[in-house]
Each structure stands twice: as structure tokens, then as C-alpha cells.
Image: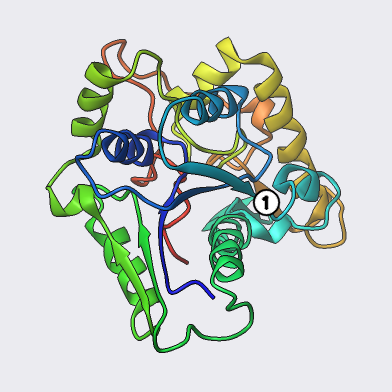
Amino acid sequence: MRKSLRVLSLGAGVQSTAIYLMMCDGEIEPADVAIFSDVKSEPASVYEHLERLKGIDGPEIVTVTAGSLEDDLLQQSGYTDIPGFFAVSGESRGMGPRGCTRKYKIIPVEQEIRRRMDAIGKPLKPDQSVTQVMGLSFDEPRRVERVKARNHGRRGWHVEFPLFDDMMTRADCVRYLDSRWDHPVPRSACVFCPYRSDPDWQKMKDEDGDDWRRAIEVDRAIRLAVDGRSEDSNALMYLHKSCVPLDEAEFKRAPSHIQPRFQFGEMDCEGMCGM
């Protein structure tokens, strides 16, 4: 039976990629394993980036999955898992709850950790310990606090935030990657994630036709799934904050010097933002 395990929660976004490379360089204590939870709904660039990371001499990278979030949404079996924008009788009522992070990111990673510790369905033994290294940066203090609260009191379970502790922001990670990595690091997020700014939606529409098509399909599917699966329903869900079908939404363009980003501070879906 394994006594200890050090794990990097690898979202394959900017922050966790920076940590992985720092582990390769000995700047951060290496993990025994890096675990990527695949929602099977990210752009091809994320999977290409992950394969490049697997090709260097670093900690082992393993992939786990709870299935395809995209397929679940299209099959109308998991529409409540994403935090779409609700409109009731045509009036916007804000966003619904988010369950996708926990179901498709947090739980699969934890199940793999417990499998390796022979602790599925039971707490760790008194002489066992797990350390999860997470890629939350200095500009994400509330997310750090949520993760700490979620793990408080769990016997033998520890969390580390090396970027936060070293006061590294996401921008610092981007600068580090520019000097350390020869390839662009894509944003880690589902192609249909509602936490997306207008310039980011517009960029997808202009440059990524297949992802744009997939997002439109999901947008329609979540609307058909709500309240009797009818677009005549009083309560409907949308991917865009305007509460109109995605292919009819008008996106405000950002000035050319500003890079598209996610809104509400959700820069990458690294799989540790809590509930």
C-alpha cells in the first residue's frame, strides 16, 4: 500500500503548464504524477499541447475522464452541469449553478488519486498522505480560499499553491512561458464555456469554424433540454449573456491591443475552482 503521493492537477492551461515546466527544471519539487481530467470538449489546440508536454522529460502525465460533457449536453442528459444564462419569459435572470467542474474535473482526479492510494470509498489511513499541487496564481485569492475550504479537515490530504505562494500572477506565468516554451499555450476551457467574453466569442467565430459550430449545437441543445425540451418554454438557457441564440448574438469587439479573455475572472478551467 502506497504511503504518500504528490500530484499535480494538470489543466493544461497557462498556470499548470508553468508549474509542470518548473517541476521539470527543479524549481518546484516534482510530482509523482500529473493528472489531466479530460472533459472531451476542449479545442484541438489543448490536446496538441498536452501531447507536447508528454514528450518532454517530466513527471508522468496520465489522463482520466468522466466522459464527454459535450456529448452529455447534446444528448440532453447533463444540461444542468454548465452555468448557462437563464431567461424567464424573455427576461434575463442571471446564470445557473455550475456543476461541470466538480463532476468532470475534480471527481475524476480524486478518484485516480484514491485508486493509487487504495483508498476508494474510504479515508486515507493515518500513515498515508496526499499532496495536490494546484495552478492557482496570485491574482486568484478567492479560488485559493475555496479550494482550501473544500479540503479543510481531510485527514492526510494537503494542497499546495506554488504560484500563489511565490506571488506569481497569470501574466507572470505568460512571461515565463514565453521564455521557456517554444509553442503557444492555449487557454484550457470547453469550446462552449459560458465564461467567455464577447471578443473571445468573436475570435472563435472568425477563426475556429468547427469550434464555433460545436458551440452553436450545444447552445441549442441546452435550450431544448430545459423545462419540457421546448423552445416555447418560459425558462430557457443560453450560452451568451444576451440570452439570444449564440448564432444571433452581437459581440462587442475589444480594442486591437487587448487580448480576448474569459469574463468573471475565469481565465482557464484548471479544474480546481471549487463549487
| Residue 226, x across and y down, in percent | 78, 58
Depth check: 45 or 76 in front?
45
Depth check: 11 or 94 in front?
11
Quarter of the image where one finds residue 179? top left
| Residue 224, x across and y down, in percent | 82, 49
Q: Residue furthest left?
A: 167
Q: Is residue 113 above or below residue 122?
A: above
Q: Residue at x 42, y 42 (%)?
A: 59
Mark 1 Cα-neighbour bin, 10 Å: few <14, some 14–19, many ≥20: some
| Residue 96, x across and y down, in percent | 57, 60
Q: Is residue 256 above or below residue 232?
A: above
Q: Is residue 128 above or below residue 61?
A: below
| Residue 4, x across and y down, in percent | 40, 70
Quarter of the image where one finds residue 43? top right
User: Quick check: can you spot residue 223?
Assistant: no
Left of 11 or right of it: where is 249?
right
Q: Number of labelled discs? A: 1
Depth check: 266 or 32 in front?
32
**Quarter that holds the N terminus:** bottom right
At label 1, the amino acid type is: Thr
Q: Residue at x 38, y 30 (%)?
A: 261
Q: Secondary structure at mark 1?
A: loop
Quarter of the image where one finds residue 127? bottom left
Depth check: 29 or 76 in front?
29
Q: Residue furthest bottom?
A: 126
Q: Residue at x 73, y 42 (%)?
A: 70
Residue for badge 1 = 65
Q: Is residue 44 above or below residue 64?
A: above
Q: Residue at x 59, y 28 (%)?
A: 47
Q: Residue furthest front?
A: 1
